[in-house]
Every structure is written in structure tokens, then in C-alpha cells.
Amino acid sequence: MPSALSVDLRERVIAAGASRRQAAKRFEVGPSSAIRSHERFQAEGAIAPRPSCGQRPAPAIEAHAERILQVDREQPQAILHAVHDIPAEQGVRTSVSGLWRFFAQHRITRK
């Protein structure tokens, strides 16, 4: 998996003053990377890359967070595979590893 562009390179692409595609060509980065960096800078004023996907909560799981946490309180010894069935019954597509990350973000240890 390719790594994010460095902050220094992002700054140079944004400050280039040329079109985004010309700046991408000049600094030998992908045009879509230059476009996204520039758009994010204009919208948020941020140059640094966003956190990787594993650090953001999954919206599908977070939408059912109260139900999952309730099951955790009711069945504290249940294994992740058993807890996985609850969102699945409600039509939420998730994985055991997704639930593991959910519990980790809520600082709950599970087996």
C-alpha cells in the first residue's frame, strides 16, 4: 500500500501556484493526490494527511453502538463471534475485526 505524501511535498504542491495537474507533473505525484490535497487545504486549511482508515470509526457499527454496548453489558463474557451476530440480525454488515476495532476505540477488551 503506498504511503501518504509528506507534508513538505504537499506544501510545495499547494504553493506551486500552477494548476493542480501541472503541479502534480512538476513534483512527480499523481494528479488525484494533488487535487485532493489542494481541495482539503481550501476546505479545511489542513495540509497533513488524514489518519489511515483503521483509525476512523466505521459509521455502520457506530450507528448501532448503543445496542452493541448494551449486549456487552448484558453478556460480558460473550466472545466476539457471538456479539457479531447482533448487528448482522439488524442488517448491518460488519466483520469480527471491525467489532474488535469498535471495542478498542471504546476501550473495552474482548476475547
Image (cartoon, helix red, strand yellow):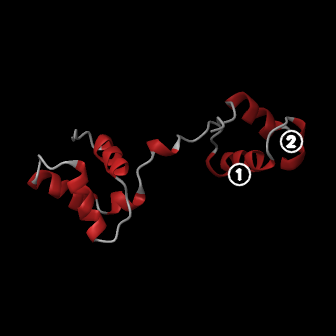
Q: Name the residue under label 2.
A: 23
Residue 5 found in image quarter: top right
Given the image, on which type of amino acid does mark 2 rest?
Ala
Q: Which quarter of the rendered picture does the C terminus lie within?
A: top left
Residue 62 found in image quarter: bottom left
Question: x%, y% of residue 38?
Answer: 74, 47
On screen, residue 78 above or below 6: below
Task: Give the SS element for disc 2.
Answer: helix
Question: x%, y% of residue 50?
Answer: 57, 42
Q: Which residue is drawn at 80% across and 38% down?
A: 13
Residue 48 found in image quarter: top right
Q: Which quarter of the rendered picture does the N terminus lie within?
A: top right
Given the image, on which type of amino acid does mark 1 rest?
Glu
Label 2 to label 1, Cα distance in Å? 14 Å
Check the image and name the residue furthest to the top.
8
Q: In this view, does 5 lie to the left or right of 71?
A: right
Q: Which of 25 and 99 is in front in this view?
A: 99
On screen, residue 79 above or below 9: below
Q: Quick one: label 2, few (<14), some, or many (20+) residues within 10 Å? A: many
Q: Quick one: label 1, few (<14), some, or many (20+) residues within 10 Å? A: some
Q: Mark 1 points at which residue?
A: 39
Question: x%, y% of residue 80?
Answer: 24, 49
